[in-house]
Amino acid sequence: MGQAAKVLQLFKTLHRTRQQVFKNDARALEAARIKINEEFKSNKSETSPKKIEQLIKIGSDVELLLRTSVIQGIHTDHNTLKLVPRKDLLIENVPYCDTPTQKK
């Protein structure tokens, strides 16, 4: 896959992730859209393949961080937030085992 295709794919992926992560929050959706577009526009004239690969890596890391670490919070009272985790963030809690198993 060429670098231009990778950049376009990353751009689309970031916007899809933004829509999932900030669902029902118009202000955050707009701020994220503007930030993504600004970052891509500011690096539009980059020609160095090494620098482009670094930027793609940074963008991929940001997408992963957004997808796996961001939880929405809604102000319900003066000092209260209601957390709204996405279904893909909820994982089964694996109980701790005091006796380690031996590898055979």
Image (cartoon, helix red, strand yellow):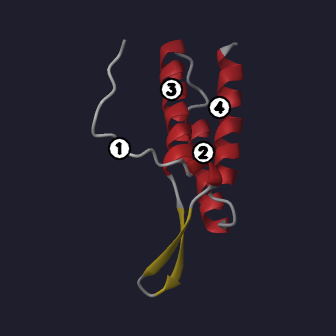
Is 35 situated above or below 84? above
Can residue 33 be seen here? The reply is no
Using the numbered discs, state the Cα–Cα distance from disc 2 to disc 3 in whole angstroms. 15 Å
Q: Which quadrant of the view contains residue 36?
A: top right
Is 79 situated above or below 17? below
Using the numbered discs, state the Cα–Cα distance from disc 1 to disc 2 in whole angstroms. 40 Å
Circle 1: is it few (<14), some (14-19), or many (20+) Cα within 10 Å? Answer: few
80 relative position to 12: left or right:
left
Q: Which quadrant of the view contains residue 16?
A: top right
Of the two numbered discs 4 and 1 on the same chain, state the one appearing first in sequence: 4
Is 62 situated above or below 73? above
Per the image, the residue denoted by label 3 is 57
Using the numbered discs, state the Cα–Cα distance from disc 3 to disc 4 in whole angstroms. 10 Å
Per the image, the residue denoted by label 1 is 96
Name the kind of residue labelled 3 in the image: Lys
Across and down, in percent, residue 43 comes to 56, 32
Q: Which of marks 3 and 1 is in front?
A: 1
Name the kind of residue labelled 1 in the image: Tyr
SS for dot 1: loop
